């Protein structure tokens, strides 16, 4: 289609050039005929010039039988020639304008052709790229079909349905996993809580056991100073003695007095004798037993 358009444009342009040249030639002939009519012919030349007379002009002059002497005839011929020259000039102007329009149309057609060629090149490149992509997609499709055939003979048309089913199964499994995760987290929280409680109870039991052991503790007076009123006991801070610990002295299974710790070491305690607590006539002596007056709670 483009080639036909370019051919028509070229033919129109050539025709415009030809008619322009033809009108130009005709104009030159009429102009010379006017000069010959006005000045005459001398030795085959236009009188008063070095311009040879064209054959077609000579033919026109001869057709008038050489009658150029009469003023009326000359005037008529001049008028006719001037009118023809005017018509030829108008025709020449029209031809030139037409030629200019055809030239512009030809340039526009050339530009249009360049644009179309560029678009055609781009289209070819796009088609080539799309062809490559199509080939890649076809290759991928074949690979998918082979894979589906290996995993259970699933047709490619069934793939969307299978994918949808897999998504539903996955959603159900995810929900179940979320429920199990919640249960596991709750279990972990309970375990942690129980472990904390067990540790607290274990610490409490250990303290209680220590207190029970301390409550069952029996120490012995190893020395007595009646003058200063204190005794030495073979137990100290390791046994749980504190300055506030109340101590009782026993002999033969009965209480005979009370002591108040004044200096406590890890394995030995100096305790003051509470004289008011002694039974009448009783004096403390080494070997007497010492127990806690108030059991630890």
Image (spheres, grey):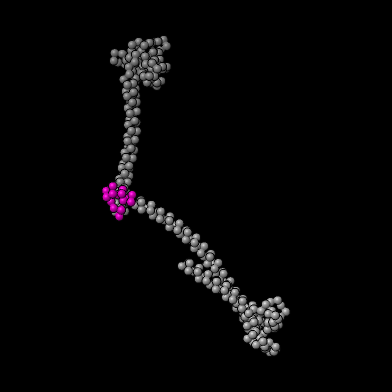
In-image side of 75 versus 142 (left or right): right
Task: Give the residue drawn at x 59%, y 76%.
Answer: 22
3 part of magenta stretch:
no
Q: Residue at x 69, y 77 (%)?
A: 51
Q: Position of residue 285 (x, y in %)?
A: 35, 10
Horizontal and vertical percent position of residue 207 = 34, 26
Residue 144 covered by magenta stretch? yes
| Residue drawn where x is 34% and y is 38% of the image | 189
Q: Is residue 106 above or below residue 154?
A: below
Helix, strand or loop for the magenta stretch, by majority = helix
| Count of marks, rendered view | 0
- Please identify the residue farthest to the right as the structure is shown: 48
Residue 249 visible: no
In the picture provided, is 100 more to the left or to the right than 34?
A: left
Quadrant of the image occupied by residue 157? bottom left
**In which quadrant will I find the C terminus?**
top left
Judge by depth and name the residue closer to the eye, 287 or 56. 56
Q: Please, which residue is most extreme toward the left here?
A: 152
- Picture quadrant where residue 188 is located: top left
Q: Residue at x 59, y 74 (%)?
A: 21
Judge whether 40 appears above or below 125 on screen: below
Residue 121 seen = yes
Q: Which residues are magenta?
A: 142-157
Quarter location, residue 261: top left
Q: Where residue 13 sits: x, y (%)? A: 55, 71
Is 240 in front, or is 201? 201
Q: x, y percentage for residue 242?
A: 40, 21
Residue found at the far front of this picture:
43
Q: Is residue 11 left or right of residue 71?
A: left
Nearer to us in this view, 199 or 286: 199
Side of 214 relative to 88 (left or right): left
């Amino acid at each position: 289609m483009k080639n036909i358009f370019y051919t028509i444009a070229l033919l129109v342009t050539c025709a415009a050039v030809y008619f322009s040249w033809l009108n130009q030639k005709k104009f030159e002939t009429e102009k010379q005929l006017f000069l010959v009519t006005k000045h005459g012919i001398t030795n085959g030349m236009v009188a008063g010039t070095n311009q040879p007379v064209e054959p077609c002009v000579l033919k026109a002059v001869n057709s008038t039988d050489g009658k150029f002497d009469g003023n009326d005839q000359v005037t008529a011929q001049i008028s006719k020639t001037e009118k023809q020259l005017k018509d030829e000039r108008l025709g020449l102007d029209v031809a030139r304008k037409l030629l200019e329009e055809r030239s512009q149309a030809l340039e526009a057609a050339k530009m249009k052709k360049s644009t179309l060629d560029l678009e055609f090149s781009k289209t070819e490149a796009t088609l080539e790229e799309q062809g490559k992509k199509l080939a890649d997609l076809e290759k991928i499709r074949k690979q998918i079909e082979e894979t589906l055939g290996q995993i259970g003979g699933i047709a490619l048309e069934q793939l969307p349905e299978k994918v949808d089913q897999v998504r539903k199964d996955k959603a159900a499994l995810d929900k179940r996993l979320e429920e199990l995760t919640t249960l596991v987290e709750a279990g972990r929280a309970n375990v942690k809580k129980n472990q904390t409680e067990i540790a607290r109870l274990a610490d409490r039991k250990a303290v209680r056991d220590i207190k029970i052991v301390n409550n069952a503790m029996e120490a012995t007076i190893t020395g007595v100073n009646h003058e200063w009123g204190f005794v030495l006991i073979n137990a100290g801070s390791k046994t749980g003695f504190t300055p506030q610990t109340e101590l009782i002295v026993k002999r033969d299974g009965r209480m005979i007095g009370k002591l108040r710790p004044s200096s406590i070491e890890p394995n030995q305690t100096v305790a003051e004798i509470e004289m008011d607590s002694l039974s009448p006539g009783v004096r403390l002596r080494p070997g007497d037993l010492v127990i806690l007056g108030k059991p630890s709670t």
